[in-house]
Image (cartoon, rainbow, N blue to C red):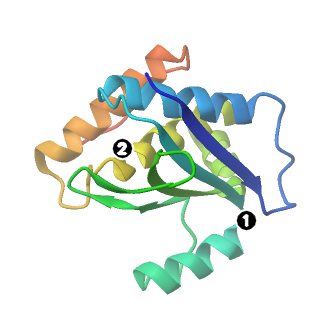
Amino acid sequence: MEKIRVIITNDQKKVKIPTGIRMLIRRCCHAVLRMEGFDDPAEISVTFVDNEQIRELNAQYRNKDSSTDVLSFPMGENGIYDINHDTGAKILGDIVLSMETALEQADRYGHGLDREVGYLTAHSMLHLLGYDHENGGMERVRMREKEELVMTQLGLPGTSSYTV
């Protein structure tokens, strides 16, 4: 696999970022790309925000005036991506993760913040690669299976509680 650059920025102060979360996100991005056979150099941007910041983005870009756990902003379509002319890497897009919601969901579902952040990262990476679950059906099932496969590969707890 070629060089993968994951740029992580913390733009929130509500949740202390635990040691190891940044490395987990990088490992998760690599695992998804490996699973999908994506062998080109790539760049991904991940930004930690709070609920108010993600609510504003959700309202601006999706016309949904509510907070959410994660937003994905793909930079490509049908496997064609913008290129960073300095590095030659394909710019896959941006992941915006609400650390407040991730912490709340980890507590609600009874697992650690690392598992929740790993899952949300895998979910968003699949969106950056063109997967979509919004219409349900087999693509939603396939996407969910891939998310759980990545969790297993990273040694994070899986879940059998999801329904489709």
* Residue at 57 percent of width and 77 percent of height: 57
| Circle 1 Cα neighbour tier, 10 Å, few/some/many (<14 / 14–19 / ≥20) | many
Q: Is residue 111 above or below residue 72?
A: above
**What count of labels does the image hold?**
2
Front residue (pair 63, 41): 41
* Residue at 63 percent of width and 40 percent of height: 106
Q: Position of residue 149 (x, y in %)?
A: 37, 22
* Residue at 72 percent of width and 36 percent of height: 22
Residue 162, located in which quarter of the rendered image? top left
In the displayed structure image, the side of residue 73 where residue 134 appears, left or right: left
Quarter placement of the C terminus? top left
Q: Secondary structure at mark 2?
A: helix
Q: Position of residue 46 (x, y in %)?
A: 62, 51
Distance from label 2 to label 1 (Cα)? Answer: 22 Å
Q: Is residue 60 above or below residue 43?
A: below
Q: Are marks 2 and 1 in contact (CB under 8 Å)?
A: no
Residue that carries the numbered disc 2 in the rendered image:
126
Instruction: Examine the rendering and report whether any part of residue 158 can be seen.
Output: no
Q: Is residue 112 above or below residue 124?
A: above
Q: Three-letter amino acid code at disc 1?
A: Asp
Q: Is residue 15 above or below residue 17?
A: below
Q: Secondary structure at mark 1?
A: loop
Upstream in the sequence, badge 2 or badge 1?
1
| Circle 2 Cα neighbour tier, 10 Å, few/some/many (<14 / 14–19 / ≥20) | many
